[in-house]
C-alpha cells in the first residue's frame, strides 16, 4: 500500500500549517495510515514541491493507491516560505494525479477556498474531481477508508469520538516529519490541546468557524506529551502549542460557562510534561489567548501565564483576539471583550512577559488582532481601535504585532448572511487605517520591542530578494529581519539590529566583522551613510578595535557598536 500526502498547507483561527510550520493534518493522516497498515509506504510532498515538479508528482502518484490533498486557509495571511493551495490547484491536481483514488481534506473541503480578507470563500463544487471529499476529521476518515478498502460506504464526515480519539494517530504519524524539507531544525510542529470554543454556547463571534466544533473537550496531558516525545525522537526541536482558541482555559474545571476560569496547575503540568518529553527542544511557544479570560480572571490568568513564561522559550506571543473596540460592533457580532478588558489583558501580559530572554526578544508579549468589515462598523470604529493602540503605545506598553485583517466570510458562520457588504464599503477606509497604524503605531513599537543594537539569536534565512536576505527566528509571530547582503537560505545567524521599519528590522551579522562587511551593510548602519561607508571600505583592513575607533569613533552609531565589533 502506498499513500501520497500533498500538504497544501492550512491556516485556521486556531492552527497553522504553512512552512516553517507543520500542522497536525499530515501527521495525523500518516498516523492513521500506519495504524491501519503498518507496512504502508507514505510519501509526503508539499504543494510547493508538487507545483515545481509536475512530472515527479505524476510519477509518484501513479504508483500510489491514494493521494490526499490537504488544503484550506480560513484566516487571511501573508506567507514568506510557502504558498498555500488555491482553488485552481485543487482543480488542476486531480488531472495530474495517477493514483487509484484521490481525496481532498482540511478546511477547504469543509468550507471552500479562502481568497483573502474582505471576500467570500470560493465554495464551488470540487466533488466531481475527487473520489473522497473529506469534511470530517481526515485521519478518522482515512483510517476507515484503509480498513474498508476504500469503500464508498465510509462516511466522509466522520469525526473523532473524543478529544483524545486521535492520540494514537498523533503519536504514530510523527515519523512523517522526516520527509518535510525543513526538518528537523527549521520545522516547527503545531500541537493541539483542544478544539472548539466555550462561547459556542452563546453563539460565538459572528465570523468564526471554531464554535462549529462545539464546547471544548481537552486532550490529556499524557496524550499530548506522548505525541511530543514521538516528534522529538524524529528530530523535532521546535513546538508551538497553538491549536486551541485560548491556551489559558486548557484543563479548566468549569463546564458550561461561556468564559471558563483558567487552571494554572493544568498549564504547569502540560508544559512540564512537554519539557520532559522533549528535553532538547529549542522553541516552545504559544498562540491565542482570549483577552476576556484575562479580564475576567486576572489572578488565575496571571498564574497560568507565569507558568508559561517559566517553561517556554523567549520571543513568544500571546495573540489576543480583540477584534473591535466599538461597542456597537461588539454587540452586533457577539464579540468577547471591550476596551477596558482588552487594555487590562495587554497590561497583565506586559507585567509578566516584557523581560528580555536569551533569544534577544522579550519573553512573552501580547499580539493584537483586529477584524474589520463586521456588521455595525462605521468610520468611528477605526478611530476607536486606533485610540486603543495609541493609548497602549503612549503608556509605554509593549506589543509584538498588530494584525489588522478584513473578515473572510465563511459559510456556516453568521457572517454568511451579512456577507462582504461592510468590507467592500469600507475597503478604502481599511487601507488608510492600516497605513496609519503601520506608521504611527507599528514603527515606534518596533523600535521599542527590538531597540537598535539588540542581538537577535538564531535568525533563520528564508528568502533572497533584490540583494536582501530575509529571515526570522523560529517561533510565534517572529520579527522579519532584512540583511543587506546575500546569505544562503536556511542558515541560522545571530543578527545585530541596526534599523527599523513598521513590520521588520534591518540587521547585520553578529559578531560584526568590520573588515568583512559589504558596502550595503555598512550603509545600513544609521549615521554612517554612503560616503563614510566607502571610506571605511577603503581604509580596511583594521588590525584591531583601537585603530578603527581612532579613525571612525567620532560617529555616534559606530562608537555605540564598539562592544559588538570583532577584528
Ligand atoms: S472567542 Fe470568538 S473568535 Fe475566539 S474562538 Fe470563540 S468564537 Fe472564535
Image (tube, rainbow, N blue to C red):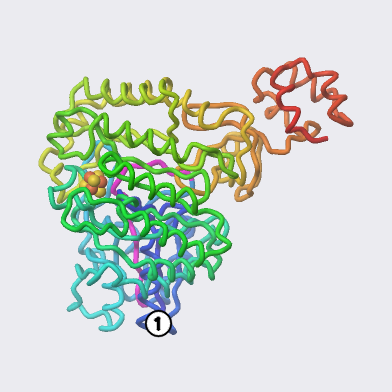
The quadrant the C terminus occupies is top right
Q: Quadrant of the N terminus?
A: bottom left
Residue at the image position 25 percent from the left and 36 percent from the top: 118
In this rendering, is residue 2 above or below 122?
A: below
Against 455, residue 216 (above or below) is below
Residue at the image position 24 percent from the left and 70 percent from the top: 162
Quarter of the rendering containing residue 416: top left
Q: Is residue 455 above or below residue 10?
A: above
Label 1 within 8 A of ligand 1 by Cβ: no
Q: Residues within 10 Å of mark 1 (few under 14, many from 20)?
A: some
Queried whether the magenta region covers residue 70, the answer comes back as yes
Range of magenta residues: 65-80
Q: Position of residue 102 (x, y in %)?
A: 31, 69
Instruction: Give the total number of marks visible in the rendering.
Output: 1
Query: Which picture quadrant has residue 409?
Result: top left
Q: Position of residue 59 (x, y in %)?
A: 46, 70
Residue shown at the point (43%, 33%) measured from the top left: 399
Using the image as rendered, state which of residue 463 and residue 539 is in the foreground: 539
Q: Is residue 486 left or right of residue 549?
A: left
Q: Is residue 536 left or right of residue 410?
A: right
Residue 256 seen in the figure: yes
Name the residue nearer the viewer: 270 or 151. Answer: 270
SS class, disc 1: loop
- Residue highlighted by disc 1: 1
Outermost residue, front side: 299
Is residue 294 highlighted in magenta? no
Residue 454 position in % (x across, y down) = 61, 33
Q: Nearer the viewer, residue 66 or 561?
A: 561
| x 20%, y 63%: residue | 127
State the image coordinates of residue 75 (x, y, percent, origin top left): 30, 45
Asked if residue 86 shows in the view, the reply is no
Amino acid at each position: 500500500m502506498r499513500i501520497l500526502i500533498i500538504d497544501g498547507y492550512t491556516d485556521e483561527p486556531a492552527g497553522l500549517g504553512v512552512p516553517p510550520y507543520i500542522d497536525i493534518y499530515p501527521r495525523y493522516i500518516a498516523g492513521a495510515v500506519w495504524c491501519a497498515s503498518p507496512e504502508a509506504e507514505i510519501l509526503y510532498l508539499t504543494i510547493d514541491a508538487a507545483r515545481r515538479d509536475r512530472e515527479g508528482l505524476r510519477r509518484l502518484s501513479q504508483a500510489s493507491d491514494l493521494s490526499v490533498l490537504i488544503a484550506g486557509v480560513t484566516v487571511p495571511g501573508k506567507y514568506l516560505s510557502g504558498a498555500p493551495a488555491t482553488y485552481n490547484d485543487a482543480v488542476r491536481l486531480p488531472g495530474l494525479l495517477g493514483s487509484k483514488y484521490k481525496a481532498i481534506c482540511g478546511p477547504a473541503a469543509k468550507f471552500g477556498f479562502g481568497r483573502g480578507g474582505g471576500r467570500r470563500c470560493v465554495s464551488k463544487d470540487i466533488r466531481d474531481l475527487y473520489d473522497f471529499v473529506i469534511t470530517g476529521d481526515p485521519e478518522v476518515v482515512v483510517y476507515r477508508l484503509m480498513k474498508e478498502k476504500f469503500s464508498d460506504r465510509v462516511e466522509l464526515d466522520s469525526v473523532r469520538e473524543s478529544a483524545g480519539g486521535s492520540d494514537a494517530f498523533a503519536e504514530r504519524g510523527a515519523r512523517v516529519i522526516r520527509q518535510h524539507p525543513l526538518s528537523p531544525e527549521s520545522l516547527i510542529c503545531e500541537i493541539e490541546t483542544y478544539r472548539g470554543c466555550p462561547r459556542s454556547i452563546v453563539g460565538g463571534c459572528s465570523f468564526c468557524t471554531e464554535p462549529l466544533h462545539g464546547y471544548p473537550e481537552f486532550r490529556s496531558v499524557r496524550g499530548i506529551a506522548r505525541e511530543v516525545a514521538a516528534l522529538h525522537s524524529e528530530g523535532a526541536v521546535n513546538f508551538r502549542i497553538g491549536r486551541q482558541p485560548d491556551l489559558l482555559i486548557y484543563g479548566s474545571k468549569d463546564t458550561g460557562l461561556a468564559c471558563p476560569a483558567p487552571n494554572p496547575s493544568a498549564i504547569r503540568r502540560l508544559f512540564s510534561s512537554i519539557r520532559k518529553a522533549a528535553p532538547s527542544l529549542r522553541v516552545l511557544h504559544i498562540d491565542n489567548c482570549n483577552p476576556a479570560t484575562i479580564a475576567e480572571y486576572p489572578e488565575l490568568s496571571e498564574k497560568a501565564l507565569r507558568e508559561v513564561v517559566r517553561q517556554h522559550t523567549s520571543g513568544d506571543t500571546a495573540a489576543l483576539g480583540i477584534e473591535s473596540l466599538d461597542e456597537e460592533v461588539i454587540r452586533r457580532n457577539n464579540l468577547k471583550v471591550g476596551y477596558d478588558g482588552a487594555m487590562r489583558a495587554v497590561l497583565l501580559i506586559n507585567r509578566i512577559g516584557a523581560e528580555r530572554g536569551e533569544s534577544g526578544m522579550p519573553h512573552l508579549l501580547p499580539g493584537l488582532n483586529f477584524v474589520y468589515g463586521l456588521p455595525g462598523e462605521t468610520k468611528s470604529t477605526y478611530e476607536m481601535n486606533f485610540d486603543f493602540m495609541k493609548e497602549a503605545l503612549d503608556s509605554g506598553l509593549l506589543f509584538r504585532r498588530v494584525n489588522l485583517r478584513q473578515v473572510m466570510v465563511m459559510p456556516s458562520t453568521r457572517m454568511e448572511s451579512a456577507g462582504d457588504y461592510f468590507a467592500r464599503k469600507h475597503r478604502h477606509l481599511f487601507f488608510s487605517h492600516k497605513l496609519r497604524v503601520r506608521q504611527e503605531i507599528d514603527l515606534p513599537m518596533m523600535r521599542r520591542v527590538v531597540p537598535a543594537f539588540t542581538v537577535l539569536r538564531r535568525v533563520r534565512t528564508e528568502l533572497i530578494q533584490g540583494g536582501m536576505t530575509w529571515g526570522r527566528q523560529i517561533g510565534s509571530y517572529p520579527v522579519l529581519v532584512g540583511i543587506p547582503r546575500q546569505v544562503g537560505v536556511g542558515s541560522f545567524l545571530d543578527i545585530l539590529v541596526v534599523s527599523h521599519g513598521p513590520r521588520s528590522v534591518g540587521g547585520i551579522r553578529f559578531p560584526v566583522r568590520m573588515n568583512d562587511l559589504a558596502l550595503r551593510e555598512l550603509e545600513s548602519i544609521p549615521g554612517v551613510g554612503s560616503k563614510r561607508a566607502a571610506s571605511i571600505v577603503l581604509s580596511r583592513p583594521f588590525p584591531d578595535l583601537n585603530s578603527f575607533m581612532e579613525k571612525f569613533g567620532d560617529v555616534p552609531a559606530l562608537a555605540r557598536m564598539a562592544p559588538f565589533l570583532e577584528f
